[in-house]
Image (spheres, grey):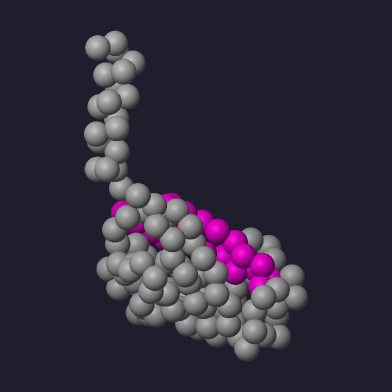
Amino acid sequence: MKPLAALTLTLATLLPLASQAADLTLDVQGLDTRRLQGAQLMVAVFAEPAQWLKQPTLGRRFSLEGAADGRITVVLKDLPEGPIAVTVFQDANGNGRLDMNAMGMPVEPFGFSNDAVGQFGPPTFEQAVVRPVAGQPLSIRLN
């Protein structure tokens, strides 16, 4: 057997073992309807506890043009298999970051998967972790 054919055959047999990317429908509620003009929905997905709130596995931004009644539904594509934790915030002024007040408290609506809430800071990865199920949307309420 030629080396290239052997490599192709080996890869073809291992392909079913590779983790496949999944899609997730995210239902975000609690948008500040007074600040939709020019605003964006910022979404970060974390698959590793050590990277929680530092380096997302996936980051996306969505226009809020389709928002209605303080709610928007978006689809996250190509998510890693396994448990994840999601952070979301409404970038009301479109500057690409979550704005904070002088005390370090967010001044834009934000939320976490599981509607997790931390004490004197953000929740832990373990509080926010979810295991997405195909066809089942994930809801997050913004604070």
* Residue 82: percent from left, percent from top: 29, 58
Residue 92 occupies quadrant: bottom right
Q: Which residues are magenta?
A: 39-64
Q: Position of residue 66 (x, y in %)?
A: 67, 75
Q: Position of residue 87 (x, y in %)?
A: 46, 68
Q: Nearer the viewer, residue 12 or 39?
A: 12
- State whether residue 32 is above or below residue 113: below
Which one is in front, 99 or 75? Answer: 75
Location of residue 36 (image quadrant)? bottom right
The residue located at (33%, 68%) in the rendering is 133
Q: Is residue 18 above or below residue 130?
A: above
Report whether residue 36 is seen.
yes
- Determine whether 65 is above or below 13 in the image: below
* Residue drawn at point x = 44 percent, y = 65 percent: 24
Residue 132 in the image: state x and y as whole percent: 34, 67
Q: Nearer the viewer, residue 27 or 94?
A: 27
Q: Residue 132 magenta-drawn?
A: no
Depth check: give the residue in front, 76 or 120.
76
Q: Residue at 29% x, 11% y: name it.
A: 2
| Furthest residue in direction front, as rendered | 1
Residue 103 visible somewhere in the drawing: no
56 relative to 29 in the view: left or right: left
